[in-house]
């Protein structure tokens, strides 16, 4: 009787992929209070809010990366199932090739031929599953690279924006200090 796949097999593989490739969950769009996030740092009256021009592209690429991760997990699950079927068929084949009584020689030979045919079909399935895993793994790596590139670009742009905002704030503070000194000199 064929064994049905466990419903959580793909989710288990997704967790393995995250651990193996060091994939962290993507940008959720929610920043924590008190964070150094772009809009948390921006004073609404003085500084312009940080905007990453490719945020939608990043969101799209994160979605594509998740889809590729899911496809890789499904391919790994299919490969695992094909390998398990091959192991079961090999065990049945070895049992048939054991000591045979003369009376059941013909029957055992027929079963053995059937199992050999099943094994070759399972080998073909396993080969297809391995090819699918390799293709899904390559697609996932490309998607992950696309996301990482955009995240680095966003980080660079944010750092430049933050430095510029800090420089503007510093110059405003220096201007206020000069104005205060001039006001104090005028009052004397």
Image (tube, grey):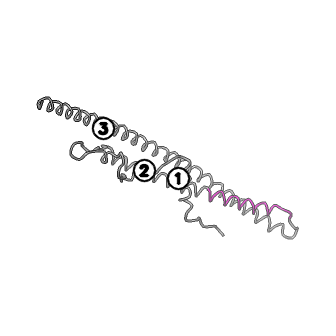
Question: Does the residue at mark 1 contact the one at mark 3 (Cβ under 8 Å)?
Answer: no
Left or right: where does residue 23 sit relative to residue 167?
right
For the view shown, which residue lies furthest in the front direction? 188
Left or right: where does residue 54 sit relative to residue 71?
left
Quadrant, the C terminus = top left
Residue at the spot x=87%, y=68% of the render?
A: 101
**Residue under label 2:** 26
Q: Quadrant of residue 6?
A: bottom right
Q: Where is residue 153? Give x, y as percent.
A: 37, 39
Q: Vertical placement of 134 versus 111: above or below? A: above
**Residue under label 1:** 72
* Whole-number angstrom distance, CA of label 2 to CA of label 3: 22 Å
Mark 3 residue element:
helix
Q: Nearer the viewer, mark 1 or mark 3?
A: 3
Residue at the spot x=40%, y=50% of the render?
A: 27
What's the magenta region?
Answer: 80-99
Q: Where is residue 70? Give x, y as percent.
A: 49, 55
Q: Where is residue 23? Give x, y as percent.
A: 49, 48
Q: Where is residue 127? Give x, y as percent.
A: 62, 51
Q: Nearer the viewer, mark 2 or mark 3?
A: 3
Residue at the spot x=25%, y=35% of the render?
A: 168
**Residue under label 3:** 161
* Whole-number angstrom distance, CA of label 2 to CA of label 1: 18 Å
Q: Nearer the viewer, residue 188 or 172?
A: 188
Q: Earlier in the sequence, mark 2 or mark 1?
A: 2
Q: Nearer the viewer, residue 36 or 160?
A: 36
């Amino acid at each position: 009787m064929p064994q049905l796949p466990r419903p959580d097999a793909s989710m288990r593989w997704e967790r393995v992929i995250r651990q193996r490739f060091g994939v962290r969950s993507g940008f959720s769009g929610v920043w924590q209070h008190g964070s150094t996030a772009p809009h948390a740092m921006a004073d609404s009256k003085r500084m312009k809010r940080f905007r990453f021009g490719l945020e939608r592209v990043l969101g799209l690429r994160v979605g594509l990366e998740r889809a590729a991760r899911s496809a890789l997990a499904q391919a790994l699950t299919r490969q695992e199932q094909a390998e398990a079927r091959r192991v079961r068929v090999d065990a049945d084949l070895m049992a048939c090739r054991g000591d045979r009584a003369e009376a059941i020689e013909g029957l055992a030979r027929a079963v053995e031929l059937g199992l050999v045919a099943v094994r070759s079909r399972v080998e073909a399935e396993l080969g297809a599953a391995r090819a699918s895993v390799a293709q899904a793994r390559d697609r996932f790596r490309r998607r992950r690279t696309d996301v990482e590139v955009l995240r680095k670009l966003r980080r660079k742009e944010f750092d430049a924006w933050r430095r510029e905002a800090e420089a503007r704030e510093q110059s405003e503070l220096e201007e206020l200090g000069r104005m205060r000194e001039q006001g104090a000199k005028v009052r004397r």
